[in-house]
Image (cartoon, helix red, strand yellow):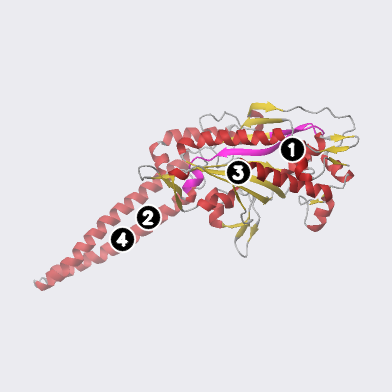
Amino acid sequence: MLTLKVITKNTEEVIARLAKKHFDGKEIVNQVIDADKIRKSSQAQLDKNLSELKRLSASIGQLMKEGSAEAAAAARNQVAELKEANQKLDAAMKDAETRLAEMLCLIPNLPHDSVPEGKHAEDNIVERTGGTVPTLPADALPHWDLAKKYDLIDFELGVKITGAGFPVYKGKGARLQRALINFFLDNAREAGYTEIQPPYVVNADSGYGTGQLPDKEGQMYHAEIDNLYLIPTAEVPVTNIYRDTILDAKDLPLKNTAYSACFRREAGSYGKDVRGLNRLHQFDKVEIVRIDKPEHSYQSLTEMVDYVQTLVEKLELPWRILRLCGGDMSFTSALTFDFEVFSAAQQRWLEVSSVSNFESYQANRLKCRYRDEDKNIQLCHTLNGSALALPRIVAALLENNQTPDGILIPKALVPYTGFDKID
């Protein structure tokens, strides 16, 4: 979340930058400032009263020794009045603190200066493209038909076992999944990322720390009895490793990678664009996470984007990188680049990765800090990216590489699959 210092010192700038995300922040920002004033004034008056209370309490005994019973009684009355006033001040201060915490969670992160104007995905800017879009025959099949033809994925069986959006991978389909996971993890490790195997459920503090909670859109699966949440991405448990932690500047950036299953309710998603693997409730993904110093975090973001590009290039997929406009960015991001691969049978671009810098927004919620060279405690910057999400990668691989004799496997994957063709 934004710090109070940023909001109070740069109020007009904050409101103007929030507008780029199409968030009208004037009212809530002013409410935050008003609540902060109440908190500060209540605290100041409370401190003043406590000092006076201490003085009066000490004077009562002395007044009694001097035989000034009337003065001592007056002091006792003052003490009682101050105690009553202090209770009200304490309640006002705590109420202001509660409202502050609630309101700060409702304010999005500020977009970076380089974020383009725009409301929708159509307003995103294509940064660069690569790869060759294959020319498929007129009778080319979409991935859901290929999965059925070669017995790779059973969508109906997933519906039987769980429900829509929970496919069952079989045979070479399951082996392709495992191959991609290992391929992505090995590449991340070679790029200097330390592998983590995180839990798939987290507590509310973890969900709050990375910004998934409060869950305004109801997208997380919630195990209510234990008050635990199924993770929507490995970003949540991995970033929370550094919650309530003070790191040393010399150790930054920290680079982690993790594979996990991901769970998303995808409430409200329907239509042709969610068919097959295009949108699932459970899917596999390898995530990369960095914790960095503010002055280096945008260099880290560039390195992460360049790294994800190497993955789609090794998979021989046509790709493009988008700089997201203000209206298409996530609540917590300061700058996001999306990767898309082209699905030749569906004739559409499919998002397979988002790489984001959250600056200090998550770190402020997490209390993720570092000690700089002057021994000062500063907020870290946090970054993460998909490297990569499997479902749409699999969709594009199946569709783009189909031939009359079967589906060809990219050369980089063959050592992981153990086969070079699905037939």
Q: Nearer the viewer, residue 151 or 86?
A: 151
Q: Nearer the viewer, mark 4 or mark 1?
A: 1
Work out which quarter of the rendered image holds the C terminus and state it: top right
Relative to 87, 390 lies left or right: right
State the image quarter where residue 329 is shown. Answer: top right
Per the image, label 1 sits on a secondary structure element best described as helix
* Residue 248 pos. (x, y %): 43, 47
Can the viewer see residue 268 in this picture?
Answer: no
How would you rate the neighbour count of disc 1 (Cα within 10 Å): few for under 14, some for 14-19, many for 20 or more?
some
Q: Nearer the viewer, mark 3 or mark 1?
A: 1
Q: Amino acid at mark 2?
A: Met
Q: Which residue is mark 2?
A: 93
Which contiguous range is marked in magenta?
A: 340-364
Q: Which residue is mark 1?
A: 412
Q: Nearer the viewer, mark 2 or mark 3?
A: 3
How would you rate the neighbour count of disc 4 (Cα within 10 Å): few for under 14, some for 14-19, many for 20 or more?
many
* Residue 153 pos. (x, y %): 82, 48
Q: Earlier in the sequence, mark 2 or mark 1?
A: 2
Q: Which residue is mark 4?
A: 86
